[in-house]
Image (cartoon, helix red, strand yellow):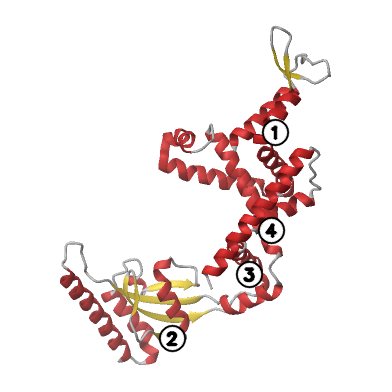
């Protein structure tokens, strides 16, 4: 794709000239190549020669760049920062070989070309996401709010990790698992013997004595205030169980995660945020979900923003190519979306 853009950019550069007088053919067309016998190749000849193979993709990218830089001019600094962050991540992996890797594994001729491509992709993603947001109804936002938005809760835990090593036999691993589980059961038994008004204090004592989470054990096992997405996915089962508890209650059954066995205590709750305060966050989530199920939106979203800017192709051949390209893209993603819908039923 970049090769195509470079070719068209070269034509534009040659057409603009470098300050010197540009030779012209008898019909008035500017020349891009001259030969000693007086023969010339004009800008128009070169354009016609590359148009079928290169011009469409290059034109679309140039058009989108102009449109999206104007539409999202207040977000350009953010987009550039995101691109720089992506490049920094790649540099951490590839170091000084990054540019050579890009040249070897992609069609880009330099790191700068690659950055420009990332930049345009991010601008396109903004337009596509805005299109998806426009498809979301208020009822969907309200439903998501009612079913998924919750207030923060304060949770403490005691973690018992089985002393399993790779060198152990399967039997030894089973014994270590059983030992850890028994220890967790014993802690629950201790809590059951404790008066309700003393549970938090007792839980802190047991955490200090038994918990294998070094970061929290000396602070009563406190994980602080959490929400559904506060902790890493390693804690998913713990968070789900915590939201089923009431304040002041602890888990009477062991909670198993990839980290080990947990006993948890929920101590405090906060009211959930008002709908207006989280509406944009919900909209982002629902728009992303919409795009996952409707990948054709990646075509329609860009179509819409081009129409918004009165995009019109004057060249009849390119116009026909563009119409065919759009229809082909719509057909492809519609088929893909239908297949996805079928497999997820």
Observer-nearest of 304 and 344 = 344
Alpha carbon distance from label 3 to label 4: 17 Å
Report helix, strand or loop for mark 3. helix
- Residue 248 is tagged as 2
Residue occupying image coordinates x 35% and y 87%: 252
Q: Residues within 10 Å of mark 4 (few under 14, many from 20)?
A: some
Provide the residue designation for mark 1: 51
Q: Residues within 10 Å of mark 3 (few under 14, many from 20)?
A: some
Provide the residue designation for mark 4: 130
**Label 2 vs label 3, nearer the camera:** 3
Residue occupying image coordinates x 16% and y 65%: 168
Q: Earlier in the sequence, mark 2 or mark 3?
A: 2
Report helix, strand or loop for mark 1. helix
**Label 2 vs label 4, nearer the camera:** 4
Alpha carbon distance from label 4 to label 1: 32 Å
Dividing the picture into quadrants, the one containing residue 173 is: bottom left
């Amino acid at each position: 794709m970049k090769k195509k853009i470079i070719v068209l950019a070269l034509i534009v550069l040659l057409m603009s000239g470098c300050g010197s007088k540009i030779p012209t053919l008898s019909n008035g067309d500017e020349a891009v190549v001259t030969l000693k016998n007086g023969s010339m190749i004009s800008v128009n000849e070169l354009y016609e020669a590359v148009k079928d193979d290169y011009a469409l993709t290059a034109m679309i990218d140039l058009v989108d760049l102009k449109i999206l830089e104007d539409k999202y001019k207040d977000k350009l600094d953010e987009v550039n920062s995101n691109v720089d962050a992506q490049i920094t991540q790649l540099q951490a992996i590839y170091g000084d070989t990054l540019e050579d890797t890009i040249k070897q594994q992609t069609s880009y001729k330099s790191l700068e070309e690659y950055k420009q491509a990332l930049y345009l992709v991010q601008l396109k993603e903004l337009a596509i996401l805005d299109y998806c947001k426009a498809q979301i109804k208020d009822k969907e936002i309200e439903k998501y709010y009612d079913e998924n938005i919750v207030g923060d809760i304060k949770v403490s835990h005691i973690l018992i990790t089985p002393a399993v090593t790779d060198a152990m036999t399967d039997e030894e691993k089973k014994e270590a698992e059983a030992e850890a589980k028994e220890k967790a059961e014993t802690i629950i038994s201790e809590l059951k013997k404790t008066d309700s008004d003393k549970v938090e204090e007792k839980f802190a004592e047991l955490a200090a004595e038994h918990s294998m989470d070094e970061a929290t054990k000396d602070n009563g096992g406190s994980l602080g205030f959490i929400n559904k997405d506060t902790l890493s996915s390693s804690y998913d089962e713990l968070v789900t169980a915590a939201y089923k508890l009431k304040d002041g209650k602890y888990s009477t059954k062991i909670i198993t995660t990839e980290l080990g066995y947990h006993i948890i205590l929920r101590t405090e709750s906060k009211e959930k945020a008002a709908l207006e305060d989280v509406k944009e966050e919900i909209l982002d989530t629902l728009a992303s979900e919409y795009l996952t199920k409707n990948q054709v939106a990646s075509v329609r979203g860009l179509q819409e923003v081009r129409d918004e800017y009165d995009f019109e192709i004057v060249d009849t051949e390119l116009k026909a190519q563009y119409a065919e390209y759009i229809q082909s893209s719509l057909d492809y993603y519609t088929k893909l979306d239908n297949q996805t819908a079928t497999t997820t039923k």
